[in-house]
Image (cartoon, rainbow, N blue to C red):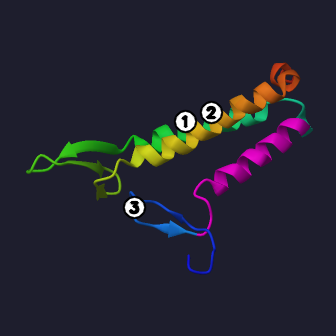
Amino acid sequence: DEEGRVYFHNASTGQSEWRHPMDDIFRQIVDYQRRVVASGGFWQVEDEIAELEENIRKDLADWMELFDEHGEKFFYNRKTDESRFDDPRMAVYHNLYQRIRMVAKMKERFPLLARAPRPEE
């Protein structure tokens, strides 16, 4: 801006923010790494991501891709009766994919922890 401060602008949505759009995910990834090191393996984080993915599937199951009378694609939620033109799956799956990718990078960085067996419960 005119004062030299950095902000982030999303050209698709027209929204601007002072924080980086990936800031929350970055903080969660840092938390993942701390937990992996403290617990001695990736099993907790992997379980959490698998549960997150399953919840995302359930949440998105009510969305349908439809076309209006002009042939324009839109998305409709049967449960909430919400309609929108942007695909609700895009942002959600993008965030999930980023988590999965970052955990894969962590496994490269911590190969011994990546191979650590799950403890007996």
Q: Are marks 2 and 1 in contact (CB under 8 Å)?
A: yes
Which portion, as a residue range, is magenta?
Answer: 18-37
Label 1 Cα neighbours within 10 Å, binned few <14 / some 14-19 / many ≥20? few
* Number of the label disc, if any, that sits on residue 13: 3
Q: Is residue 108 left or right of residue 11?
A: right
Label 3 Cα neighbours within 10 Å, binned few <14 / some 14-19 / many ≥20? few
Name the quadrant of the N terminus: bottom right
* Number of the label disc, if any, that sits on residue 50: 2
Judging from the image, what secondary structure is the residue with disc 3 in?
loop
Q: CA distance from mark 2 to mark 3?
A: 30 Å
Q: Is residue 118 above or below residue 86?
A: above
Residue type, mark 1 in image: Glu
The residue at 17%/48% (across/down) is 72
The image shows residue 9 at horizontal and vertical percentages of 49, 63
Image label count:
3
Judging from the image, what secondary structure is the residue with disc 2 in?
helix
Q: Which residue is mark 1?
A: 54
Judging from the image, what secondary structure is the residue with disc 1 in?
helix
Residue type, mark 3 in image: Thr
The image shows residue 13 at horizontal and vertical percentages of 39, 61
| Residue 27, magenta (yes or no) | yes
Q: Closer to the camera, 119 or 72? A: 72
Q: Which secondary structure type mostly characterizes the magenta part of the structure?
A: helix
* Number of the label disc, if any, that sits on residue 45: none
Q: Is residue 7 left or right of residue 44?
A: left
The residue at 29%/43% (across/down) is 64
Q: Is residue 52 visible?
A: no
Q: Closer to the camera, 70 or 15? A: 15
